[in-house]
Amino acid sequence: MKIILATNNRHKIEEIREFLKEVPGVILSEAKDPNDPLELKEEGATLRDNALQKARTAAHQTGEWALADDTGLFVESLDGRPGIFSSRYAGEQATYEENRFKLLSELRDVPEEKRGAYFSCVMALVHPDGREVTVEGRLLGRIAREPKGNQGFGYDPIFWLPDRDRTLAELSLEEKNKISHRGKALYKMKGVLEGLTKLEG
Ligand code: ITT
């Protein structure tokens, strides 16, 4: 069973490949060469809409199964912002660093107990014949006062895990996958894929 990874984010590709590397019968493929990225639009009102939109685009372009994820960071004291706008929080072309800086600035005067946040990752698997599955994974934590760690990507350096006293960016890729929003979604998706590969032979 060939699956196209419908993402232009190389960090996501690494995490997804690491998690699904041992599923028998599943071959993961990137859509095109890095100089010609997929045009993946996110026009929906929810993470689920956006994950489905990205997976449908890749499935229809390639004629194969496609897997996409849409992820957001939801901060309690900001009424859930940046949420579905996490990649564009500090502007359309914002870098990870600019997004982190904006979030830290907004939370400058927010005390420890009000810095709760969670990541939500919605993953969609779509076949061009219309079959579609979505799953979700969440990770609870707090927004740190300053960035720490150099693993991972995006908001990882400022996402603090109270029970480990470390940020997500201080975990190895394998450790992050064991507990993260994406790891939890992938765990569910792995079950779906194992069922499908048995059915499809
Ligand atoms: P694709 O749409 O091509 O998959 P993207 O980077 O635009 O890539 P998202 O819209 O799902 O992906 O992600 C929104 C932002 O959320 C992303 O730019 C990161 O800043 C952040 N993000 C996503 N997953 C994350 C993770 O596991 N850890 C930290 N930040 C993450």
Image: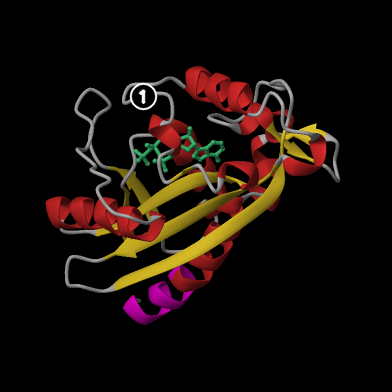
Q: With 201 as the anchor, is 143 left or right in this view?
A: right
> Number of marks in the image?
1
The residue shown at (18%, 65%) is 128
By secondary structure, the bulk of the magenta-drawn segment is best described as: helix
Quadrant occupied by the N terminus: bottom left
Amino acid type shown at disc 1: Gly
Note whether ligand 1 is within 8 Å of mark 1. Answer: no
The spot of residue 173 in percent (x, y) is 64, 37
From which residue to which does the magenta span run? 193-200
The residue shown at (51%, 42%) is 81
Q: With 130 as the anchor, is 98 left or right in this view?
A: right
Quadrant occupied by the C terminus: bottom left
Q: With 103 as the anchor, is 25 left or right in this view?
A: left
The residue shown at (50%, 53%) is 121
The spot of residue 144 in percent (x, y) is 73, 30
Q: With 125 as the anchor, is 137 left or right in this view?
A: right
Q: Is residue 195 magenta?
A: yes
Residue 93, by quadrant, is top left
The residue shown at (24%, 42%) is 40
Under tag 1, what secondary structure? loop
Q: Is residue 79 magenta?
A: no
